[in-house]
Amino acid sequence: MSVAIIAGTAIYNIPGTTFKEENVETPYGTVPVYRVQGDFEDLIFLARHGIKHDTPPHKVNYRANIKALEILGVKRVLATYAVGSINKEIPPLGLALITDFLDFTSNRKHTFFDGGDRGVKHVDVSITYNPRLNKKLLALAPDFDINLRPNAVYVSTNGPRLESPAEIRMYAQLGGDVVGMTGIPEATLARELGLCYAAVAFSVNWAAGIEKTIQFVGDSDSFDKIKANILALFIETLKTTSDTECCVP
């Protein structure tokens, strides 16, 4: 069985590895994925926005991406989200483990079950993010110098514009901790296909209205170290878990 890492903004490869590109044909379109060569050939790397970051969040083909992973036999998926921080306990460069979401997206292809030949199915998303993968990520995080805040609520917006201060105040009142543009429908589509999915968000800015202006974390040694540590944590988590262990009802 293969495993996968889906990476978003600022992560376009896994340092120290080489890849072989594969194009996966799905009913929703063709998806380029990258299979790691060497010690961990079961690992598939998928750049959500493309390795040149040329696909904005509202145009990502989420159904094709998730279907491609299923076609490749992937069961366990770890994803990164670049986010803005709403909760002051998660400052820029902070990391959070996502366990729930608020969906404010629109006009996206949100489901595989849209009638016709595919039928209609109402999938329970009470537990969208795999508890066993979450537990392993939290347990291993200190080994990679990562302070991973648990139980974060991800607010998914359409983009590509940023949110207004009033929107951020509303999301905070609803319990949102971080805000991004790609987490949904990716996570719920994975849930529909029975993939074991977990996600770590890393903050690149304070959300609108929290400070006078929005300032993004720029390239720096600290930022590069965090990205490398996240990927190392993901690889170790995938190596030390199994489909049998994680992917149970």
Image (cartoon, rainbow, N blue to C red):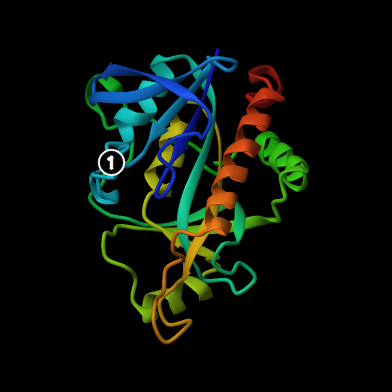
Instruction: Tell me: residue 81, above or below residue 123.
Output: below
Residue in the picture at 26% in, 59% down: 160
Q: Is residue 180 left or right of residue 3?
A: left
- Give, as a three-letter code, the residue at label 1: Lys
For the view shown, which residue lies furthest in the bottom direction? 212
Instruction: Tell me: residue 76, above or below residue 54.
Output: above
Q: Where is residue 74 in the image (x, y as percent from the top left)?
A: 49, 19
Q: Which quarter of the image is occupied by the C terminus?
A: top right
Q: Can residue 212 be seen in this view?
A: yes
Q: Residues within 10 Å of mark 1 (few under 14, many from 20)?
A: few
Q: Which of the 4 image quadrants contains residue 30?
A: top left
Instruction: Tell me: residue 161, above or below residue 61.
Output: below
Report which residue position mark 1 lands on: 52
Foreground of the two, 150 or 21: 21
Q: Where is residue 102 in the image (x, y as percent from the top left)?
A: 46, 58
Instruction: Tell me: residue 27, above or below residue 92.
Output: above
Q: Position of residue 118 (x, y in %)?
A: 29, 22
